[in-house]
Amino acid sequence: MNSCKANHCIECTVTQCANHCQTENYCALDRILVGTHEANPTMDQCTDCMSFEKK
Ligand code: SF4
């Protein structure tokens, strides 16, 4: 039985994250923080989930 509480407002495909629901492509957190590692972001690859946690 999957006990992960998927937040259906936050879709995510990063299964390597400790907050990912694994069987469903959702995050389990109530909210996340998105940031950037670029000085001038121009595409989606420039953004990062700052709530990522290593398993
Ligand atoms: S914390 Fe970020 S990377 Fe991790 S599952 Fe949630 S949305 Fe995905």
Image (spheres, rainbow, N blue to C red):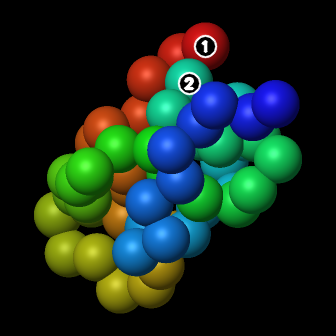
Label at residue 36: none
Q: Quick one: which residue is furthest to the top in this view?
A: 55
Residue at x 37% of width, y 64% of height: 47
Q: Nearer the viewer, residue 18 or 2?
A: 2
The vertical placement of 38 against 11, above or below, is: above
Q: Looking at the image, how many numbered discs can be counted on the residues?
A: 2
Q: Residues within 10 Å of mark 1 (few under 14, many from 20)?
A: few
SS for callout 2: loop
Q: Position of residue 48 (x, y in %)?
A: 38, 54
Residue 36 is at least partly visible in this image: no
* Residue 30 or residue 18, whichever sits in front: 30
Q: Which amino acid lies under the numbered mark 2 shown in the image of this protein?
A: Ala
Label 1 residue near ligand 1, CB within 8 Å: no
Q: Could you classify mark 2 by the number of other residues whose Cα lies within 10 Å: few (under 14), some (14-19), or many (20 or more)? A: some
Figure quadrant of residue 16: top right
Residue 13 position in % (x across, y down)? 70, 58
**Quick check: is the Cβ at mark 2 less than 8 Å away from ligand 1?**
yes
Which of these two is toward me, 14 or 24?
24
Residue underneath mark 1: 55
CA distance separating discs 1 and 2: 4 Å
> Could you tell whether 38 is left or right of 52 in the image?
left
Identify the residue at horizontal 40%, vertical 75% (top origin).
9
Residue 42 visible? The answer is yes
Instruction: Check residue 18 in the rendering and tell me which mark sits there, or answer none.
Output: 2
Q: Which one is nearer the viewer's eye here, 18 or 34?
A: 18
Query: What's the amino acid at mark 1?
Result: Lys
Residue 35 appears at what percent x and percent y? 22, 57
Identified at 61% across, 13% down, the residue is: 55
Q: Sequence-wise, which precedes: disc 1 or disc 2? A: 2
Screen quadrant of the N terminus: top right
Q: Are marks 1 and 2 in contact (CB under 8 Å)?
A: yes
Tag 1 secondary structure:
loop
